[in-house]
Image (cartoon, grey):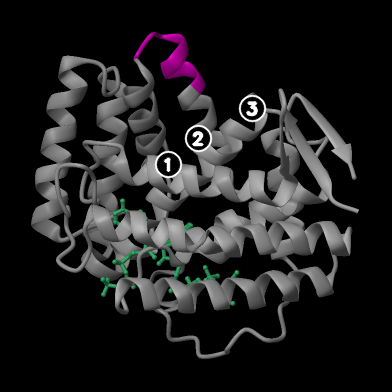
C-alpha cells in the first residue's frame, strides 16, 4: 500500500514528496547568501574544494536516498533496529553516491544523516508532522545502535569530540535536534514576524544555530578559538537586531572576515539549517489530502 500525497489534481507518493522537500531544503540552504564561511551564491567561503554547482549536484544526487529512507520507514512501520539499519545502509550508499558525484569531496555527510533520519521519521507518521514530533521520532531512531556502522572512530567529528569533550552530529540527532527545535525554528518565526524578509529570517535562523552548536567542522579546522568566535559573533549579530538591521549586517561582515581568516566553515550549522527548512516546510506545507492506494 502506497500513501499518496494529493495536491489539487496532482498525486505524489509520500516518499517522492519527502525527497523533494529534503532536496529543496539543501538547495535553499546552499543558495542562501551571505553565509559566513560557507559556500553560497557569492563564492566558496572558507573552502577551496567546494562551490555552489557542486553543492547543487550533490543535493540532487541524494534524492533517491531520501526517498528510499522514507519508503523503508513506511514499509517497516515502526521505530526499530531493522529500520535503523535500513536507514544506515541507505545513508552509506548515499555517501558513496555523493562522493562519486563530487569527485571525493564531502559536501553533505552531516545532511544525509540529519535529513535521512527526519525523512524516515516523517514517513512513519505522515499525519503527525509538527517539528517536535518528527524530531522526537528521528531521535528515537538515532538512539538505536546500527551494528553495521564502521567502527573506525577516526572521523573528523569523532576526533574533535574526543579532544574537546563536545557533542557532535550523532548526539545532536539523538537529543532531538535541539539546535533546530529550540534555536532555529523559533528564530525563523520571530524574524518573519518582525518583517525581516525571508532571506534575512533564514540567515537569522542559521545564526541562531551558530550561537550554541559545537560544530565539529569549525572545531576541526579552527579549534576552540574558531568555535568561540563563531558563537560570539552569531550572538552579536542577533543582539544587534539580526541580518535585516544595519548594525547586524555590519557585525555579520566582521564575523565573515574572521571566519575566513580562521578557515572556519560552519558546515554542521548549514546542515541543521537545511533540517530547519525541511521541518518548516513539513509543518506549513501539509498536503491537502493523504490517501492510501
Ligand atoms: C553520525 C554521523 C553523522 C557521523 O558523525 P561523525 O561526527 O563521526 O563524522 P563526520 O565525518 O565528522 O561527519 C559529521 C558531519 O555532520 C556535520 N556536523 C558537524 N558538527 C555537527 C553538529 N554539532 N551537529 C550536527 N551536524 C554536525 C558536518 O557536516 C557538514 O560539514 C561537512 C563539510 O565540512 P568540511 O570541513 O569541508 O569537511 P571535512 O570532510 O571535515 O574535511 P576538511 O575540508 O575539513 O578537510 C559537510 O559534509 C556537511 O554535511 C560533519 O561533517 C553519520 O554520518 C554516521 O553514522 N556515519 C557513519 C557511516 C554511516 O553509517 N553513514 C550513514 C548514516 S545515515
Ligand atoms: N553551504 C555549505 N558550505 C559549506 N559546507 C556545507 N555543508 C553543508 N552546506 C554547506
- Compared with 124, 89 (above or below) is below
- Local packing at callout 3 (Cα closer than 10 Å; few below 14, some 14-19, many 20+) is few
**Disc nearest the viewer among 1 and 3:** 3
The kind of secondary structure element at disc 1 is: helix
Residue at the (18%, 62%) spot, across then down: 47
- Residues shaded magenta: 189-196
Asked if labels 2 and 3 touch by Cβ distance under 8 angstroms, the answer is no
Q: CA distance from mark 1 to mark 3?
A: 23 Å
- Does the segment drawn in magenta span residue 191? yes
Quadrant in which the C terminus is drawn: top right
Horizontal and vertical percent position of residue 45: 17, 52
34 on left or right of 114:
left
Q: Which mark is residue 183?
A: 2
- Local packing at callout 2 (Cα closer than 10 Å; few below 14, some 14-19, many 20+) is many
For label 1, the residue is 209
- Does the segment drawn in magenta span residue 28? no
- Ranked by sequence position, the earlier of labels 1 and 3 is 1
- Ranked by sequence position, the earlier of labels 3 and 2 is 2
Q: Quadrant of residue 4?
A: top right
Asked if labels 3 and 1 touch by Cβ distance under 8 angstroms, the answer is no
Asked if labels 1 and 2 touch by Cβ distance under 8 angstroms, the answer is yes
Q: Quadrant of residue 17?
A: top right
The kind of secondary structure element at disc 3 is: loop
Q: Which mark is residue 285?
A: 3
Amino acid at each position: 500500500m502506497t500513501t499518496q500525497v494529493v495536491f489539487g489534481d496532482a498525486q505524489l507518493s509520500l516518499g517522492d514528496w519527502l525527497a523533494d522537500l529534503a532536496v529543496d531544503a539543501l538547495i535553499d540552504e546552499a543558495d542562501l547568501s551571505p553565509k559566513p564561511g560557507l559556500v553560497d551564491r557569492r563564492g566558496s567561503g572558507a573552502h577551496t574544494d567546494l562551490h555552489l554547482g557542486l553543492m547543487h549536484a550533490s543535493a540532487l544526487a541524494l534524492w533517491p536516498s531520501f526517498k528510499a529512507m522514507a519508503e523503508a520507514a513506511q514499509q517497516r512501520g515502526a521505530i526499530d533496529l531493522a529500520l535503523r539499519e535500513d536507514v544506515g545502509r541507505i545513508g552509506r550508499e548515499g555517501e558513496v553516491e555523493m562522493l562519486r558525484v563530487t569527485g571525493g569531496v564531502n559536501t553533505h555527510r552531516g545532511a544525509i544523516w540529519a535529513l535521512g533520519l527526519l525523512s524516515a521519521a516523517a514517513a512513519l507518521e505522515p499525519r503527525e508532522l509538527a517539528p517536535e514530533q518528527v524530531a522526537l521520532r528521528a531521535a528515537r531512531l538515532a538512539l538505536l545502535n546500527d551494528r553495521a556502522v564502521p567502527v573506525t572512530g577516526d572521523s573528523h567529528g569523532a576526533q574533535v569530540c574526543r579532544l574537546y569533550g563536545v557533542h557532535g552530529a550523532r548526539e545532536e540527532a539523538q537529543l532531538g535536534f535541539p539546535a533546530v527545535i529550540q534555536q532555529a525554528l523559533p528564530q525563523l518565526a520571530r524574524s518573519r514576524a518582525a518583517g525581516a524578509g525571508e532571506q534575512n529570517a533564514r540567515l537569522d535562523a542559521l545564526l541562531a544555530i551558530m550561537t550554541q552548536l559545537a560544530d565539529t567542522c569549525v572545531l576541526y579546522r579552527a579549534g576552540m578559538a574558531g568555535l568561540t568566535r563563531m558563537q560570539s559573533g552569531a550572538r552579536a549579530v542577533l543582539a544587534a537586531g539580526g541580518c535585516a538591521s544595519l548594525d547586524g549586517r555590519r557585525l555579520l561582515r566582521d564575523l565573515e572576515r574572521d571566519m575566513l581568516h580562521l578557515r572556519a566553515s560552519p558546515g554542521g550549522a548549514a546542515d541543521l539549517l537545511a533540517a530547519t527548512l525541511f521541518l518548516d516546510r513539513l509543518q506549513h506545507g501539509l498536503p491537502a489530502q493523504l490517501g492510501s492506494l
